[in-house]
Amino acid sequence: MENDRPENDRPDTDRPDTDRTATIGVIGGSGLYELFAPGTADEIDVATPFGPTSSPITLGTMAGKRVAFLTRHGRTHSVAPHRINHRANLWALRSLGVRAIVSSSAVGGLHPDYAPGTFVVTDQLIDRTSGRADTFFEDQVQHLSFADPFDPVLRRAAVDAIAALDVPFRPTGTCVVIQGPRFSTRAESIWLRAAGGHTINMTMTPEVPLAAELGIGTVNLSFVTDADAGLAPSEDEAAASTEEPVTHGMVMERLARANEVIVRAIGEIVGAVPDDYTPRELVPATASASIMQRGGSDR
């Protein structure tokens, strides 16, 4: 946990003013529940037309830039993957002025080149979820252009930033997003690898497409915590099947050990976001604006 790190190891943070705006958002995945040092950020609740967010939003400074931070699973990891209110989370961040999101994710490795301990700047998704509220446009037809889910400008900035760190790193990767909350069977892991997956996760969709519908660009930094269903990073599936399967405890333990470098990497990406960054328009801006014109509520 970040609060256990020495003060001089914390990210660059300063006490913000009371301005409730930020152009960069950070969404923390499993294991990342605080981003700023105590006393350096302001906490706010944002009412949305889609209900409450996963956690209050904290506004602070990171890498010299104003940042809005929200933790995806709640501060006590109380929100299961299939129960995350992604629409509320994204609407709230956009209402504060966020146009670029740096998200962190814990992922399993499906491919030999994506071993535990590897950082990945994800570039593609395979959506295997079901029953989730995955669009803001329920009463109108808006087809999202989604061939390249993650913003190319933000990805280039992230790749350059992470490449400069002394960490195991992959500049691309296809993430298979499963429904959860259960982990995969061994057969499913083999199947999803054969389908082209490099990593596996439970939360990247609908978060990424919903952000795009609101005119927010996203970049994802994943940390490989495990070899999914116990399939070791080896092409020999027979030998691999004897490896230890993933457990929630294993994931959280490895994330805790890597927390310091994860936060440092996020700070590097935040610092690399161009000051003149403008997100792509993947649906008409007028359509995105119509969603944001809906007033917040506590329902």
Image (cartoon, rainbow, N blue to C red):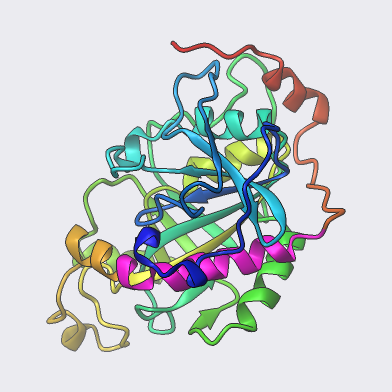
Position in image of residue 280 (x %, y %): 79, 47
Position in image of residue 83 (x %, y %): 34, 33
Q: Is residue 51 above or below residue 134?
A: above
| Residue occupying the point 68% across, 38% down | 17
> Position of 226 compared to 265: left or right?
left
Q: Residue furthest right?
A: 276
The part of the chain drawn in magenta is: 255-274
Q: Is residue 113 visible?
A: yes
> Position of 158 compared to 220: left or right?
right
Residue 29 vs residue 270, the one in the foreground:
270
Q: Is residue 197 visible?
A: no
Q: Is residue 155 above or below residue 166?
A: above
For the N terminus, the image quarter is bottom left
Splitting the image into 4 quarters, where does residue 216 fall?
Answer: top right
Splitting the image into 4 quarters, where does residue 4 fall?
Answer: bottom left
For the C terminus, the image quarter is top left
Position in image of residue 238 (x %, y %): 17, 85
> Position of 117 compared to 40: left or right?
left
Residue 213 belongs to the span the image colors magenta: no
Position in image of residue 70 (x %, y %): 50, 42
Residue 264 belongs to the span the image colors magenta: yes
> Position of 269 compared to 69: left or right?
right
Residue 59 vs residue 158, the one in the foreground:
59
Q: Is residue 254 above or below residue 290?
A: below
Magenta-drawn stretch, dominant element (helix, strand or loop): helix
